[in-house]
């Protein structure tokens, strides 16, 4: 029995996105592609001011209320995103001036995708189930719930079990990533340690490694 996830909806694994410049003109776009690799693996041109991720409303297994609620949580965690829900489409906008690190942008893209990617979309329900059970949770506790929800959907014992798909373009965390969740300060210190800001030239960043709590190497070595 699912409280929030609509099992009658068939989520998709495809993404649609575009870059907007300062005049809100589209400078580059992709439709029905497998992932955000053109964004995450390439350098973002400096004239790009916004990234807009669009998805068919009929392929998102959550109500408008839950979509807005999820986006509100992401903003509280310092992954700023705005959302516009239309009749047939939902548009999520990332304003790059609100971001400091490329890894931060990459994570925000995957958190948006968690609303509609097949299998991974259970994440949102797992997260809100934890909030419902802990209505007075602090922001730091919620951030731990976010990581624990990733673990829940990838562990064999869970009713939400799907599979581990941690990489830069699908999930930020795998089931074996942690015993104790990272704090917000810790993950943003790791973003800083990548030494890659939003518009810097491409440098490989393993997002899943950034979120591990057992990294013993210096943080600069996550860029392998």
Image: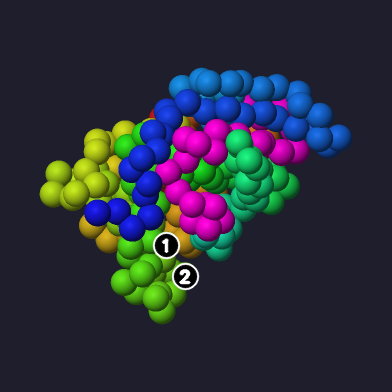
Left or right: 121 with respect to 58? left
Q: Is residue 88 magenta?
A: no
Q: Where residue 215 appears, x then y in whole percent? A: 31, 47
185 vs 208, left or right, is right
Q: Residue at x 56, y 60 (%)?
A: 72
Q: Which mark is residue 143?
A: 1
* Number of other residues with Cα within 10 Å of mark 2, as a class: few under 14, some 14 to 19, many 20 or more: some
Q: Closer to the camera, 190 or 184?
A: 184
Residue shown at the point (65%, 42%) measured from the top left: 86
Q: Nearer the viewer, residue 124 or 102?
A: 124
Residue in the foreground of this view, choosing between 139 and 211: 139
Residue 139's disc is 2
**In the image, which residues are magenta?**
43-68
Q: Is residue 214 visible?
A: no
Quadrant for residue 42, please give it.
top right
Q: Label 1, label 2: how many angstroms apart (C-alpha)?
A: 6 Å
How far from the left and from the top, in percent, is residue 196? Answer: 58, 39
Q: Position of residue 212 (x, y in %)?
A: 33, 48
In the rendered image, the residue lying farthest to the left is 157
- The answer to whether one can see residue 165 in this image is yes
Q: Position of residue 73 (x, y in %)?
A: 51, 60
C-beta proximity under 8 Å, tags 1 and 2: yes
Quarter of the image with the C terminus in it: top left
Q: Quadrant of the N terminus?
A: bottom left
**Is 56 in the magenta?**
yes
Residue with the most extreme bottom position: 136
Pointer 1 local density, CA inside 10 Å: few below 14, some 14–19, many at least 20: many
């Amino acid at each position: 029995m699912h409280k929030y996830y609509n099992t009658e909806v068939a989520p998709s694994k495809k993404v649609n996105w575009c870059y907007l410049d300062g005049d809100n003109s589209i400078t580059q776009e992709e439709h029905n592609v497998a992932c955000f690799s053109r964004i995450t693996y390439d350098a973002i041109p400096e004239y790009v001011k916004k990234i807009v991720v669009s998805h068919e409303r009929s392929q998102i297994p959550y109500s408008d209320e839950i979509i807005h609620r999820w986006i509100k949580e992401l903003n509280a965690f310092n992954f700023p995103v705005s959302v516009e829900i239309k009749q047939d489409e939902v548009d999520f906008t990332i304003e790059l001036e609100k971001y400091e690190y490329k890894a931060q942008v990459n994570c925000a893209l995957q958190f948006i995708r968690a609303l509609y990617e097949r299998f991974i979309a259970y994440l949102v329900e797992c997260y809100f189930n934890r909030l419902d059970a802990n209505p007075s949770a602090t922001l730091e506790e919620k951030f731990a719930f976010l990581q624990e929800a990733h673990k829940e959907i990838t562990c064999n014992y869970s009713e939400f079990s799907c599979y581990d798909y941690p990489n830069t373009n699908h999930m930020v965390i795998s089931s074996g990533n942690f015993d104790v969740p990272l704090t917000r300060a810790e993950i943003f210190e790791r973003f800083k340690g990548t030494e890659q800001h939003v518009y810097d030239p491409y440098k490989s960043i393993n997002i899943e490694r950034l979120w591990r709590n057992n990294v013993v190497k210096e943080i600069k070595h996550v860029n392998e």
